[in-house]
């Protein structure tokens, strides 16, 4: 299978982040690892791009974040741990429905089963 | 990891964050979180590749193009943070002298005071000349007080936080700094109460002076500490060559 790069992921990144956080709170790198694992290594995202999306979603109230208590030897560079809010859970549910509808329509248009 | 590698990773982060128009607090959050990310990614790559230079290059590839990330980060800045950035940039532009910042604040305080006094004069009941003169003088004093307050904070942060721990000398600096403000403001309080007949005539209660001195000392300490932390962090990141 062909790798899926950032351009194709655009527009779905926020839903993907929400779905990874459904499994439990996580910091940025852990979110990326979960995405990689779920995408069988075929999702190719520039890692820095994750953070603007996280900041937007935090601002929108879909996520909350707290600084980790220790910097684990990174000398003053702590990570932030993100967690889904109820608003985020509702957005994830809506995103799933939207995706199912999108995939069905695209499947019909391209003549392939969704 | 050696210091040189850490600096290279910090430069990677700073290239994306420095051009972003966001408040100091927002950029501090971005810097710390992105640095934690690239440090962890670098460790992963070093474990995989075993070579520091290759690991550094691979971390950069994983992180992404600096200009693109800057655009994305800029787009993620909230409207209220952007508004606060304009305010902060005007009054607290990093790297500028306290005199420069004081002149900007004095200008705005003076302009706002003039508008308020003019509106009060035009819309309000006619006031005796002494009241108008008093209010005008008060606003002029407030505008000019920035020229004492900001250099004083600058002086205080260098005196209090250059070395760690406490000494009698540091306590004396703090008391002197707060005294410079407490006594004139106590006097202004005395004038206000007598001009507007707000309180008992005669000397303003002395215990109030003591309380004001304590509150002012705590406030000065806190403001100087925050200013010192911001200044150190600004210098740490601003000194990185990102071009």
Image (spheres, rainbow, N blue to C red):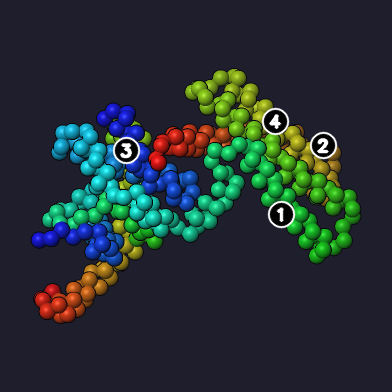
Is A19 on the left or on the right of B172, as rendered?
left
* Mark closer to the chain start, 1 or 3: 3
Find residue B158 and report its horizontal and vertical position in percent: 56, 27
The chain letter for the residue carrying disc 4 is: B
Q: Residues within 10 Å of mark 4 (few under 14, many from 20)?
A: some
Query: Which is nearer the eye, B167 or B110?
Result: B110
Horizontal and vertical percent for residue A45?
A: 24, 54
As measured in the structure, the alpha-carbon distance from the residue carrying label 4 to the one carrying label 2 is: 18 Å
Q: Would you name the residue on which mark 1 appears?
A: B112
* Residue B42 seen in this snapshot: no
Mark 3–mark 4 distance (CA, rounded to whole Å): 46 Å
The answer to whether B137 appears left or right of A111 in the picture is right
Residue B9, label in figure:
3
Most foreground residue, A39 or B190: A39
Give residue B179's mark: 4
Task: Choose mark 2 or mark 3, whichever is in front.
Answer: 3
Q: Quadrant of the C terminus of chain B?
A: top left
If the image is split into quadrants, where does the N terminus of chain B sit? top left
Mark identifier at residue B203:
2
Horizontal arrangement in the rendering, residue A62 relative to residue B213 (left or right): left
- State whether discs 4 and 2 lie on one chain: yes
Tell us which disc is closer to us: 1 or 3.
3
Q: Looking at the picture, do discs 1 and 3 lie on one chain?
A: yes
Name the residue: 57% across, 51% down.
Answer: B87
Percent from the top left, x then y, of residue B157? 56, 30
Q: Are marks 3 and 4 in contact (CB under 8 Å)?
A: no
Relative to residue A87, is residue A112 depicted above or below?
Answer: below
Residue A11 location in percent, x, y? 29, 65
The chain holding disc 1 is: B
């Amino acid at each position: 299978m062909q790798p899926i790069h950032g351009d194709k992921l655009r527009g779905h990144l926020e839903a993907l982040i929400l779905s990874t956080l459904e499994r439990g709170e996580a910091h940025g790198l852990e979110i990326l690892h979960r995405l990689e694992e779920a995408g069988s290594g075929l999702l190719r995202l520039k890692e820095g791009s994750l953070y603007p999306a996280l900041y937007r979603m935090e601002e929108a109230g879909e996520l909350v974040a707290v600084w980790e208590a220790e910097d684990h030897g990174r000398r003053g560079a702590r990570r932030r741990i993100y967690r889904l809010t109820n608003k985020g859970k509702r957005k994830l549910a809506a995103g799933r429905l939207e995706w199912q509808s999108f995939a069905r329509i695209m499947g019909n248009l391209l003549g392939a089963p969704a | 990891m050696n210091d040189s590698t850490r600096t290279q990773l910090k430069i990677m982060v700073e290239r994306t964050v420095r051009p972003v128009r966001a408040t100091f607090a927002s950029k501090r959050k971005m810097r710390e979180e992105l640095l934690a990310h690239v440090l962890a990614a670098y460790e992963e790559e070093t474990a995989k590749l075993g070579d520091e230079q290759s690991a550094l290059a691979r971390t950069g590839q994983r992180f992404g193009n600096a200009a693109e990330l800057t655009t994305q980060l800029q787009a993620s800045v909230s409207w209220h943070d952007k508004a606060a950035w304009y305010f902060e940039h005007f009054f607290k532009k990093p790297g500028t002298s306290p005199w420069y910042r004081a002149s900007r604040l004095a200008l705005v305080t003076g302009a706002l005071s003039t508008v308020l006094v003019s509106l009060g004069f035009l819309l309000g009941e006619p006031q005796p000349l002494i009241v108008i003169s008093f209010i005008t003088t008060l606003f002029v004093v407030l505008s000019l007080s920035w020229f004492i307050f900001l250099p004083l904070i600058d002086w205080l942060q260098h005196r209090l936080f250059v070395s760690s721990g406490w000494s009698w000398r540091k306590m004396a600096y703090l008391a002197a700094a707060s005294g410079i403000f407490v006594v004139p403001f106590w006097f202004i309080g005395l004038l206000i109460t007598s001009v507007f007949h707000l309180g008992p005539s005669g000397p303003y209660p002395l215990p109030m002076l003591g309380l004001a001195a304590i509150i002012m000392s705590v406030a000065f300490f806190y403001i100087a500490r925050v200013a010192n932390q911001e200044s150190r962090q600004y210098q740490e990141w601003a000194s990185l060559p990102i071009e």
